[in-house]
Amino acid sequence: GEEVAQTPKHLVRGEGQKAKLYCAPIKGHSYVFWYQQVLKNEFKFLISFQNENVFDETGMPKERFSAKCLPNSPCSLEIQATKLEDSAVYFCASSHGLGQDYGYTFGSGTRLTVV
Amino acid sequence: GQQVMQIPQYQHVQEGEDFTTYCNSSTTLSNIQWYKQRPGGHPVFLIQLVKSGEVKKQKRLTFQFGEAKKNSSLHITATQTTDVGTYFCAGRGGSNYKLTFGKGTLLTVNP
């Protein structure tokens, strides 16, 4: 399809619980990006994939965050042992390429609330 | 690392007034993109600028890329209530593919 599909739209977790978010990129897009948007609108880059391979994970808090993009499955972002500060909207975006002709198409996001 | 500053943080205008948001990068950019995010929504790609001094227009929106490729602006002429949202610039620097987002400018329009 022509949209990036993110599920669930909302997720509530108790502190210390696991959270798993899903993203189906646009068919034919080779690159997937995860961003965290906190209050005050700041976008924090987490990780990117080129197909199923990690391309850049410099933004990932590696102790608790992990992500995968497996063939024929939605990409996923998993947070083990959530903390209050993980509360944010997590956006997935996909792109056909990385060159200067390509913008990102964002999904509608998953709002994670950690209580 | 690369930083992208965006001002103002907020702008409230009367319908029909003009609006401008400015973006400045700490490093020279290979290109800059602009996105619009409606309240409660997701960022939507508006445009990409690549060339030094480039100016592009989309109806009432005018986008500029500075000569030094370190700054950019988005200008909206005669704002409408449908223009409400947060406008983000996002820069890509040199060989670094990664987009770095500014903090956005929230535009509200009084009808």
Image: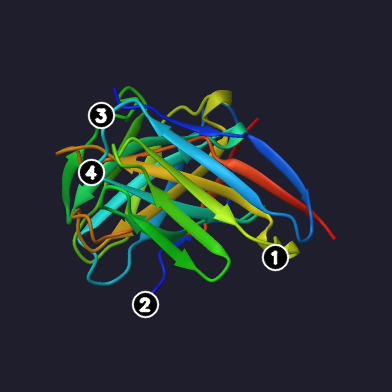
Report the Cα–Cα distance between label 3 and label 2: 29 Å
Q: Which residue is mark 4?
A: B30
Crowding at label 2, few (<14), some or many (≥20) Cα neighbours within 10 Å? few
Labels 4, 3: one chain: no
Q: How is the image coloured?
A: rainbow
Residue at the spot x=32%, y=30% of the render?
A60
> Closest to the observer: B61 or A98?
B61
Question: Label 4: chain?
Answer: B
Type of amino acid at the residue the image marks with label 3: Thr
Residue A105 seen in this snapshot: no
Instruction: Residue A1: give its label.
Output: 2
Do the residues under discs 2 and 1 have CB atoms within 8 angstroms?
no
Type of amino acid at the residue the image marks with label 1: Thr
Q: Which residue is mark 1?
A: B82
Q: Which residue is mark 3?
A: A58
Type of amino acid at the residue the image marks with label 4: Ser
First in sequence, mark 4 or 1: give its number: 4
> Closest to the observer: A80 or B32?
B32
Question: Label 1: chain?
Answer: B
Crowding at label 1, few (<14), some or many (≥20) Cα neighbours within 10 Å? few
Report the Cα–Cα distance between label 2 and label 1: 27 Å
